[in-house]
Amino acid sequence: MSTDEFLSMLTAEEKRLYENKKRIKYHQRWGSYLSERQWATVREDYSALGSAWDDFSFDDSRYRTYRWGEDGLAGTCDTHQLVCMLMALWNGEDDFLKEKLFGVTNSQGNHGEDVKELYYYLDNTPTHSYMKFLYKYPHAKFPYEQLVEENGKRSRLEQEYEITDTGIFDEGRYFDVVHEVAKSDDDPEELLFRITAYNRGPDAAPLHIAPHVVFRNTWAWGADKGTKPHMKALDEYTVEVDHPKFGPRQMVFAPAPGVTDGSADVEPVLLFTENETNKKHLYLQENEAEYVKNAFHDRIVDGDKDAVNPEKQGTKACAWFSFDQDGGVPPGDYVTIRYKFSRKGGDIDELEFDNVFARRQDEADAFYWKVSPLPLTNQLRQVQRQAFAGLLWTKQFYYFVHNYWSGGDPNHPPPPENRANGRNKDWKHLFIDDVLSLPDKWEYPFFAAWDTAFHCIPFAMIDPEFAKKQLVLLTREWYMHPNGQLPAYEWNFSDVNPPVHAWSCYRVFKIERKMYGTEDLDFLEGVFQKLLLNFTWWVNRKDAGGDNLFEGGFLGLDNIGVFNRSEPLPTGGRLQQSDSTGWMAFYCLQMLNIALELAKTRPVYENIASKFFEHFLLIADAMSFTGAKGDESEPTEQSLWDDKDKFYYDAIHFGSHTTSLPIRSLVGLIPLYASLTLEPELLNKFPSFKKRLDWFIENRKGVAERNIASMSNRGVGERLLLSLVNKDRLVSILERMLDEDEFLSDYGIRSLSKYHDKNPFKLDVHGQHYEVKYLPGESDSGMFGGNSNWRGPIWFPVNFLLVESLQRFYLYYGSDLKVECPKGSGQYLNLAQCAQEIQHRLIHLFIPDADGNRACNGENDLVNQDPHFKDYVPFYEYFDGDTGRGLGALHQCGWTAVVAKWIHDNGLTCRTPKTPKTPVPERKQSIHSFTLDSSDSHRDDDISLYAPKAGPFPGSLMRRRSGKSLLNLTIHALDDDNADSDVASVVSGENVTARLAELDLCPSVSHTSTDLRAFDETLVDQIRAAFDKYKLRTDEDEADEFETRH
């Protein structure tokens, strides 16, 4: 296929990704990379004790310049956050200009830090060609003090006090502020911005909108010797933005249509200041600049005209639009502002401007339809679309250079002496200056290694190049420690996260191969080489006894154990962790997988595959048969498998004996992850690997027979199974996992068995009482900050791996192995069907039930039922083990976004929440069924039924145009001889509404698409082919969907 033919098969967004990959155009230079909270981060903490939450407060952030980044509301910036564009608001009542999101700190919240605002990521594309963000801004004074005080009064046994609890949104007394960004047709460096604010209340309300452009302060520290960037006004509508990196650009603002059809245009007022610290306010010292960071607040809110630079220049600028005429925005009405960031500047043609947004929206629809080209319901598509949007909005520029951070900057006093010897002192090599995928841009505005691994699964579906880059970065020498450890997260880079990097790399490789037909073996080989170092670090550092039983500390599961597993045990002895050992067995098998994949074209990897095969068997043997003699096949006393309870537990090893800790948690389920099927044709393809495998089985017979499913009785398709669990153990574990009185919730697998609700595990050590009790909601302790809980809630990453494990076991055992699911139901399912049932239950968290309620919203009637809330989907960090109520970070759009993959794989068979399961799991009995007619007569109609909807606030919805735009349009159309004088009168700000009537123009147009919506015929043909392929799928094709085969 020629390049032209290939490109003709792509959607517009796919073409942009192709051009970006081939470096034809840099489509991803500008995106939603701005942080939502830079204050109270470790990077900005210059305190002696490392108290980040106290050293740089929310109040301070309005006056103090950041060293390591910028933050803001609905922010857009370049890949190095040099030029930042954000939105600021004021309702005439607030004490502060709303420039950033507010939340309680770790010590203020009864369950740790928590953002206390309502905002939603509604749309985004991989190249950020179209982005849409919704912020709900109250009419009344924002309840800062009330939120802090009420949360401070509550105990850890109570739920958090949220902004919806204040009643501030009652009667619709708020604005829906929709912030959109679209890139122009031909130049990805030209950004168009449109902000539309809808008054949902019963009365008129004033609103001030002040879009900002800000230079990140790179000049005050003494490290940057380059030219200082500069902004200045060119005229009443244009700001020249001149940064040495990009050269002069122009931010052009159009007059905004008035608050009604008969109102005068609202003219922008350009304000300028410096992005410099207000030392006088904070420290009672003289300011280094006459105009400082908080100037716009002082001018807009306090009315201080002297706060801003009258010469209209600086390093921070905004355009102030005041919609306060006649009481403000009328009830049920809206206002719109338009502006652009461009190389060439020039007037804004508002009609064409809106047409660009419509085209980008339609292109986004086409792109996401092709990603999931099946007959999904609109509800499922909206969940998937918003999951992808959140994933893309939580990309952020992350900057941290350990040398500068620990040693201080030339122009500033050195940091406290003990600082360099304290937090992260062993990570002196770190030099991070990249756009990274973050867990949550407010609660977790930093990368976390194992979170990233899960983020990359849905990323691989829409932008595999970005996914691969994220995985590669963490293994590069400026991230990975010289000893091979991957950095965990900024609070403690030395903490140990589960070793899921190899798994993610291989899954991304296979997803790209399956969805896009690309086998990036160079990526796989490069990251594999680095992971050899990391694997060696694990073996050398986390197997203290050299017996293949691993420790690892908390391993991302925070408070799951009876003790803090990252600290020395109060009992003495050494903790042998079932989860850590299970993770390492899993790691071995993933490295084996990659080695065999590479060996297909690079035979040298056969020998490396043999190494991981043997290492896996040694770990598997240690988990159950440490101390076993010869062919002994029963678990030994030192085993992590409890043969009485039929479950894996952690154990404390005291040298002469081992004591088990019988807590039924994910710790005992994680060993299921370590499973792999080997195809017979694969073994025949690699004679060297097969020879070594046969040698091991012959010469280490006891180890092999205890840990490899029978060589004489192969599985389905003559497959061989490598697994930590044999069939009996698998069935025993699943009996607990699929029991609704233990692990199985209506919404997925719990992190701790409900058995411990009535049977808490208790232990007394040296007069100290320890207890693990089932807690389906938030944590009741402050362990690991108290803002997460692994003692009962449902977490997506571990569920994702459990689902994959069941699918792998199905490949070996096939349809003959069935288990009761749920236990006591009388319904027996094979393991693939069990996996699908778990996926459906997790998808149900986000799908409205028959009453219109989403489980993730809890019992909040406002967000469940209000027409202006009910379509927005929050992607929480974790979920209540009983009710499914969302908990923790509100926008954990990374690993919770893996739901997008499940919707892609199994959305068609997903029933409505709280409805009976279909007795026979056939596609045609699903409520999301789709049956294609054998004739062609209705095919286009059928396909059109499943075309993606734009969702809330479609980009193609036409907005009012300003009087200036309409008048200028007519002047040019009529080629008026007096054009110069007419334009001058418009620029002067004269009310031209009366003159519009003479020209038969009206500032309002119909709320319909600006262009006729039609999908490209090539795309329709591709969707039709996908429908046909789905209709003809066989059980064998279903198995291929599990993506675990070679």
Image (tube, rainbow, N blue to C red):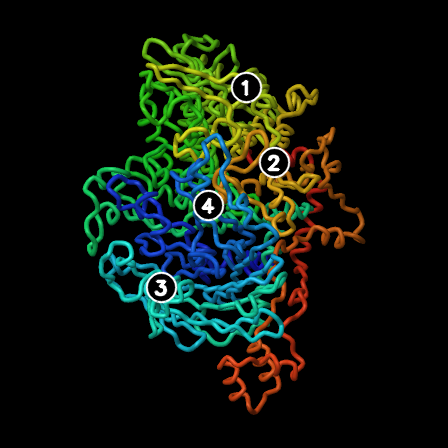
Q: Which residue is mark 1?
A: 755
Which of the two discs, 2 and 1, labels the residue nearer the N terminus?
1
- Amino acid type for the residue under numbered disc 4: Gln
Q: Nearer the viewer, mark 3 or mark 1?
A: 3
Q: Which residue is mark 3?
A: 295
- Amino acid type for the residue under numbered disc 3: Ala
Question: Label 1 neighbourhood size at 10 Å, few (<14), some (14-19), many (20+)?
Answer: some
In what element is the residue under mark 3?
helix
In what element is the residue under mark 1?
helix
Q: Which residue is mark 2?
A: 1040
- Amino acid type for the residue under numbered disc 1: Tyr
Specify whether 413 is left or right of 369: left
Which of the 4 image quarters holds residue 660?
A: top left
In what element is the residue under mark 2?
helix
Residue closest to the eye, 871 or 439 = 871
Q: Position of residue 111 (x, y in %)?
A: 44, 35
Residue 146: assigned label: 4
Question: Label 3 neighbourhood size at 10 Å, few (<14), some (14-19), many (20+)?
Answer: many
Which of the two discs, 4 and 1, labels the residue nearer the N terminus?
4
Q: Position of residue 88 (x, y in %)?
A: 45, 60
Give the alpha-carbon distance from disc 4 to disc 3, as whole Å.
26 Å
Question: Label 2 neighbourhood size at 10 Å, few (<14), some (14-19), many (20+)?
Answer: few
- Amino acid type for the residue under numbered disc 2: Asp
Which of the two discs, 3 and 1, labels the residue nearer the N terminus?
3
Which of the two discs, 4 and 2, labels the residue nearer the N terminus?
4
Residue 656: assigned label: none
